[in-house]
Image (cartoon, grey):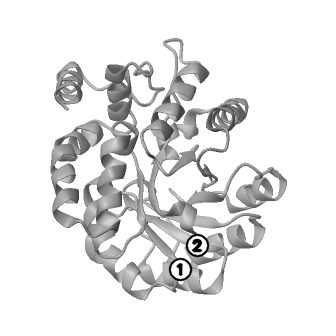
């Protein structure tokens, strides 16, 4: 899918100081992404703290992003979890007219076998009215979706069109790129290895740091796709310290601190997450101002 090549960002859900969803801030964040060159937006991914959102709040987030976007860039909706039956029911009943694809995380906590992961996504594929992006993030799910499983799914189900690969393992990413069917996209889910993955044959990124520095990060990915290696790596090394900082005390506490420094939103997160400490907040603020 051409619309998924380049830089996507996993949108946060900004909260007011009273922990309610801040729709005005979310609109500002959406505009900031689009005006600075982001190619597509991911709504209600794990960065959105969707584990702590009510169903009503999730619908509010969707409505706010759709209205702010005004069809300017493609939208992807996060529809994932560890209850396969519940996901299938949602896929059969939700209106996806505003979305080009779904992003569906490999089941967490249950720790399924590779065959269990395959059967889960088989059910997702058969129920989904839109293309499916797999999401492998072993650090959060406690199980690694192996390249052999991904390639099997991509081969067997034509609407499984991409994977967001966030194992942080460049060798595993290269095995995916080597063995994938033609047209299947390998998308980085790890900001620090995005450029090496793109240069190895990946299709881009679904980013967190890109939400703080959309112009720079999307330029880096574009240069990587154009094989302008030196220019791309110059931007990578400019942002490398910031990538480390935003994940140092958890996501999305770090990226929300950047948004606060930029004047886009409060830095409020919901428990069990807490704000970054004062030392990290100062380092993030100084980095943003220096850049």
Label whose residue precedes the other's in the sequence (1 or 2): 2
Q: Secondary structure at mark 2?
A: strand
Q: Residue at x 51, y 85 (%)?
A: 182
In the rendered image, residue 165, in percent from the top left (x then y), is placed at: 41, 65
Q: Is residue 31 above or below residue 178?
A: above
**For residue 161, which numbered disc appears in the image?**
2
Residue toward you, 30 or 120 = 30
On the question of residue 106 being in view, the answer is: no
Q: Which mark is nearer the camera, 1 or 2?
A: 1
In the rendered image, residue 60, in percent from the top left (x then y), is placed at: 69, 30
Mark 1 touches mark 2? (CB < 8 Å): yes
Horizontally, is 210 left or right of 247 in the view? right
Q: Residue at x 80, y 50 (%)?
A: 95
Horizontally, is 183 left or right of 95 in the view? left
Residue toward you, 93 or 262 = 262
Write down the residue under mark 1: 183
Q: What number of labels is visible?
A: 2
Q: Residue at x 63, y 32 (%)?
A: 68
Can you say which quadrant of the picture contains the C terminus? top left
On the question of residue 209 being in view, the answer is: yes
Q: Quadrant of residue 115?
A: bottom right
Horizontally, is 48 left or right of 179 in the view? right
């Amino acid at each position: 899918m051409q619309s998924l090549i380049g830089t996507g960002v996993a949108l946060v859900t900004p909260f007011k100081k009273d922990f309610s969803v801040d729709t005005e801030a979310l609109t500002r964040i959406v505009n900031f992404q689009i005006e600075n060159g982001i190619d597509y937006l991911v709504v209600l991914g794990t960065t959105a703290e969707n584990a702590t959102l009510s169903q009503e709040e999730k619908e509010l987030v969707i409505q706010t992003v759709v209205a702010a976007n005004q069809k300017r860039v493609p939208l992807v909706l996060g529809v994932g979890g560890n209850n396969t039956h519940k996901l299938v029911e949602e896929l059969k009943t939700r209106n996806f007219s505003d979305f080009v694809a779904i992003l569906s995380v490999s089941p967490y906590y249950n720790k399924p076998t590779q065959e269990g992961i395959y059967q889960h996504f088989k059910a997702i594929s058969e129920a989904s009215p839109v293309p499916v992006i797999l999401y492998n993030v072993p650090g959060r799910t406690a199980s690694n979706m192996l390249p052999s499983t991904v390639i099997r799914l991509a081969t067997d189900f034509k609407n499984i069109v991409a994977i967001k690969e966030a194992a942080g393992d460049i060798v595993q990413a290269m095995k995916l790129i080597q063995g994938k069917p033609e047209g299947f996209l390998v998308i980085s889910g790890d900001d620090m290895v995005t450029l090496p993955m793109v240069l190895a044959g990946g299709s881009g990124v679904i980013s967190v740091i890109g939400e703080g520095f959309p112009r720079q990060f999307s330029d880096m990915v574009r240069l990587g796709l154009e094989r302008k290696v030196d220019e791309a790596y110059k931007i990578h090394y400019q942002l490398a310290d910031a990538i480390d900082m935003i994940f140092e005390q958890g996501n999305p506490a770090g990226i929300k601190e950047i948004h606060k420094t930029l004047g886009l939103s409060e830095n409020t997160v919901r428990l069990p997450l807490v704000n970054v400490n004062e030392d990290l907040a100062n380092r993030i603020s100084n980095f943003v101002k220096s850049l």
